[in-house]
Image (cartoon, rainbow, N blue to C red):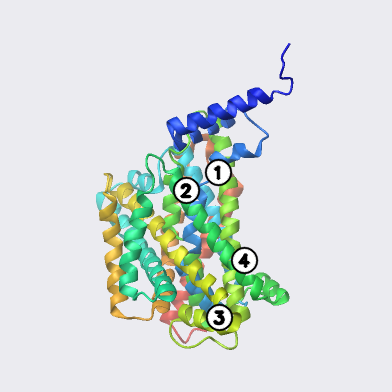
Amino acid sequence: MSNDPSGLRSRTQGETESAAFSARKGWDAWVRESAGTVLSGEATGRLDRFIPFLGPAFIAAIAYIDPGNYATNIESGTRYGYQLLWVVLWANLIALFAQGLSAKLGIATGKNLPECIREALPHPFLRIAYWLQAELMAIATDLAEFLGAALGFQILFGIPLGVGALLTGVLSFLMLGLRPGSFRYLEVLLTAFVGLIAACYALELFWIHPSPSASLRGLLVPSLPGTEGAYLAAGILGATVMPHAIYLHSALTQRRIPARRIEEKRKLIRLSFLDVSLAMALAGVINLAMLAMSAAAFAGSPPGEGNAILQAYRALSPMLGAFAAGAFALSLLASGLSSSAVGTLAGQVIMQGFVGFPIPIWVRRLVTMVPAVLVIASGIDTTKILVASQVILSFGIGFALIPLLLFTQSRRWMGPLRNSPGVRIAGWLLCAAVIGLNAFLLVRLLLPSFQ
């Protein structure tokens, strides 16, 4: 008869062996082993069994709380109060949908979205054209991230914008190097950045109390106040449903956890959607908090002319104290640094996926770093650049979303894992809404008399 009826010894021994295995083989091996036991049905019912499946969506979520979001949300809240909260809500719902499908594509096919597009396009000219537009989106993304981080360095430490931009490039490169044999270290690091930004905004909301009734009205009653409102709405959309994050997520899941049988892939897709739901919910709450805080603090009495982010920081100091203003600046810096690293990863996936051969990461870093440094050196208002870059990104969403919908509904690419009819209908309706908003903005900008 066993002297250990509770099984404590066996559990302790198993935990010790698991820790030893993790130390010997590395984090990647532990994730694969732990995930394999869940997918095979050997381990169920314990919350910690979900941990190996968390991570990719939190890397992608950094793109949804980058400095472009700060610029569009602060500008929108300052100019129009709570009116554009509904855009933030729907943009995050579209992002949730797109990231879920992107993760599904990587799991089902073992390929990322740029690789699928390259294989599907019949002519090299079309592949190059598609790559160039994706590269333009990556440059616009990196521009926003460099500007935001440089502005964070300037606010917190008085470092000039140009020097801050160079420092951002160096630090983001070092962050990408902090993965000795394991990509999970980067997942944990970037998840910690998401947590830091969320904590900073929780403190902001503790000091600033947005109006519940006005917030609810802004969430539920759609309105586009003039051409400028449509422009900011497109910027919010571009800052939230970022094309590079759609390309990236499929690469993060394509070979992360092996799943060979269809049932294992189905279970992995369901668990990846849990990861996506948690990460996108957190990013969505942060975005809503950004706009609501700006509406509560600055609507009706804008913080000043010029750089809205810098003016918001200066206005927060006398309004709420140096600690609250410092939390705002710290969150901006964390957002810029982390999103810059993610932008480099996404750019590498885009370039390698479309050209079909490996690209050194330092080359990838230089391609999008140089335009950002040149723009900063020009001395143009950084907030205007940030908002404009996000509007450009909104026009790139369709180029990522349309092929994603086509691939994930295709029996040839997905087999029995292809989208259900309901998912297909929802996807094309959301895609039509994105393209419709872009078309509406173009008409307003090109034909000012059309109101």
Q: For label 1, count other residues whose C-alpha is less than 10 Å away and answer few (under 14), some (14-19) or many (20+).
A: many
Q: How crowded is mark 2: few (under 14 residues within 10 Å), some or many (20 or more)?
A: some
Decide which of tag 1 and tag 3 comes sooner along the chain: 1
Q: Nearer the viewer, mark 4 or mark 1?
A: 4
Q: Is residue 204 left or right of residue 168?
A: right
In front of the other: 57 or 354: 57
> Residue 196 appears at what percent x and percent y?
54, 60
Q: Are marks 4 and 1 in contact (CB under 8 Å)?
A: no
Residue projecting furthest to the front:
3
Give the spatial CA distance, label 2 vs label 1: 14 Å
Q: Is mark 3 on a helix, strand or loop?
A: helix
Position of residue 275 measured from the top left corner of the image (x, y, whole percent): 57, 47
Q: Residue at x 57, y 31 (%)?
A: 39
Residue linked to disc 4: 202
Q: Which mark is residue 187?
A: 2
Q: What residue type is labelled 1?
A: Ser
Distance in Å between CA atoms under marks 3 and 2: 32 Å
Horizontal and vertical percent for residue 13? 59, 25
Q: How far apart are marks 1 and 3 (CA)?
A: 39 Å
Which class describes the residues within 10 Å of circle 4: few (<14), some (14-19), or many (20+)? some
Element type at mark 4: helix
Along the polypeptide, which appears first: circle 3 or circle 4?
Answer: 4
Pointer 3: what residue? 316
Q: Do the residues labelled 4 and 2 touch (CB within 8 Å)?
A: no
Where is residue 165, by image quadrant? bottom left
